[in-house]
């Protein structure tokens, strides 16, 4: 096994990093680092003899988190994060209708179930209660955690 990233190299996480229960002071499932955030490699090691785990220092939050190699990209690589990511909680800016019938009221809360939908990645699959809809980014506001 050969590491891909070197000590001090700036990298970007390609998915949201949530606490798996190993980071003290955070509940299991708490969002630690948003997708697209950059940090710096501190060191690396192996897990179960077949995975390289990098210790990444995210300066903005002053967190040090272990990341698998497939969760990282070089910071200089092209990146389009979009406005929302999987698991984000949102509020509708306006009512959503199907064939003129309102199915989701303005102000309704939902959760992002899939990203990068539509021809240019401008919409998302959002779950409201038990129903899912493809919703344009312009119709949503992020609810901060």
Image (cartoon, rainbow, N blue to C red):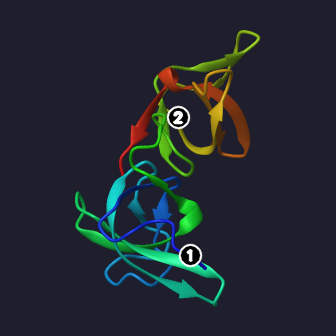
Secondary structure beneath dot 1 equals loop
User: What label does residue 127 carry, if any?
Assistant: none
**Which quadrant holds residue 10?**
bottom left
The residue carrying pointer 1 sits among few (fewer than 14), some (14 to 19) or many (20 or more) residues within 10 Å by Cα, namely few
Q: Residue at x 63, y 90 (%)?
A: 48
> Could you tell me which quadrant the N terminus lies in?
bottom right
Q: Residue at x 35, y 54 (%)?
A: 38
Q: Is residue 103 above or below residue 27?
A: above
Residue picked out by circle 2: 108
Residue picked out by circle 1: 2
Residue 144 x %, y %: 35, 47
Q: Residue at x 55, y 78 (%)?
A: 52
The residue carrying pointer 2 sits among few (fewer than 14), some (14 to 19) or many (20 or more) residues within 10 Å by Cα, namely some
**Which quadrant holds residue 111?**
top right
**Which quadrant holds residue 26?**
bottom left
Q: Earlier in the sequence, mark 1 or mark 2?
A: 1
Q: Is residue 59 above or below residue 65?
A: above
Secondary structure beneath dot 2 equals loop
Observer-nearest of 112 and 77: 77
Residue 130 x %, y %: 72, 46
Residue 64 x %, y %: 32, 74
Q: Residue at x 47, y 82 (%)?
A: 21
């Amino acid at each position: 096994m050969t590491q891909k990233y070197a000590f001090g190299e700036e990298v970007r996480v390609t998915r949201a990093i949530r606490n798996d229960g190993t980071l003290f002071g955070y509940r299991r499932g708490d969002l630690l680092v948003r997708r697209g955030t950059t940090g710096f490699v501190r060191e690396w090691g192996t897990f179960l003899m077949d995975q390289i785990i990098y210790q990444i220092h995210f300066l903005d939050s002053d967190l040090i988190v272990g990341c698998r190699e497939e969760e990282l990209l070089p910071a200089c690589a092209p990146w389009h994060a979009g406005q929302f990511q999987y698991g984000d909680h949102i509020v509708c800016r306006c009512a959503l209708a199907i064939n003129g019938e309102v199915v989701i009221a303005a102000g309704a809360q939902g959760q992002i179930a899939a990203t990068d939908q539509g021809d240019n990645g401008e919409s998302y699959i959002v779950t409201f209660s038990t129903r899912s809809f493809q919703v344009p980014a312009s119709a949503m506001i992020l609810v901060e955690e």
